Amino acid sequence: MRFFMNEQLISQINHAGTPETVIAAITAITVSDTPELETINALIAVLSHHHPTVRAVAVEALVKLGNSTVKPLITAYKASCDQGLQAHIIQALAQIASPDALDVLAEVLGTTVANHCQGNVRRIAARGLGNIAINSPDVEVIFRVQDKLTWALLTPEDWGLRYAAAVSLQAIATPEAQAALQNAIAGEADQVVRSRIALALSPLIINS
């Protein structure tokens, strides 16, 4: 019964005449049991929809379905050359915060920025890495995330990425993350980023 319902919802997504019809089908998928791979892939395909609200609802649906969508999302990311689709995939992965997405998010963080959109995606990836570390009990995962975020805090010319890295390191709140923030503040030239790092360090100053 569930298979036929999923088939019907996929057909509704693929042949919908209006954004409202697509959104209704997406909503129905999110309240069902763990969907089949074909259903997840149909949701991923919707991330390329021309209507921004539909794309946003698809991201929310994939996040709500959680870990079952991570591997299909990563596969779709690697298979696509569409930067818009890839950006929405990174949004979903950053919010799901599965350790399985660590390598992809770290790769995005190190991408050379060619345009504003790529810069935004890197910042989302930085926040996603922070979410992974916060929710992981694995010391090795936390170490890898901290190492990548420390690089992002100290190296790139993109001030927005440094800002996002500071936010994530503050949230991780390990001694190593705090040390990275302390090391970065003296050499940070951008006033906005410097203020954000200072804010991240303020609880340490109060408690010292």
Image (tube, rainbow, N blue to C red):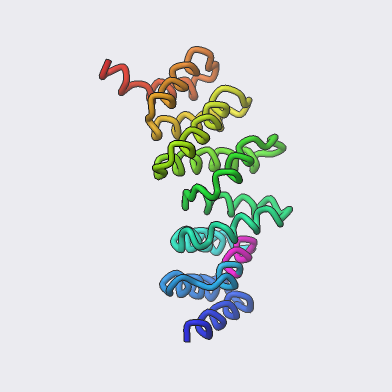
Percent from the top left, x then y, of residue 61? 48, 63
Q: Residue furthest top?
A: 186
The answer to whether 3 is drawn above or below residue 173 in the figure is: below
Is residue 47 rendered magenta in the image? Answer: yes
Give, as a single range, the part of the protein colored magenta. Answer: 42-49
**Viewed as shown, does residue 204 lie left or right of 64?**
left
Magenta segment's dominant SS is helix
Is residue 93 rendered magenta in the image? Answer: no
The answer to whether 136 is drawn above or below residue 70 in the figure is: above
**Viewed as shown, does residue 205 lie left or right of 55?**
left
Percent from the top left, x then y, of residue 86? 64, 52
Q: Residue at x 61, y 46 (%)?
A: 104
Percent from the top left, x then y, of residue 151? 57, 27
Q: Residue furthest left?
A: 207
Q: Residue at x 59, y 58 (%)?
A: 73
The answer to whether 123 is drawn above or below residue 200 in the figure is: below
Residue 118 visible in the snapshot: yes
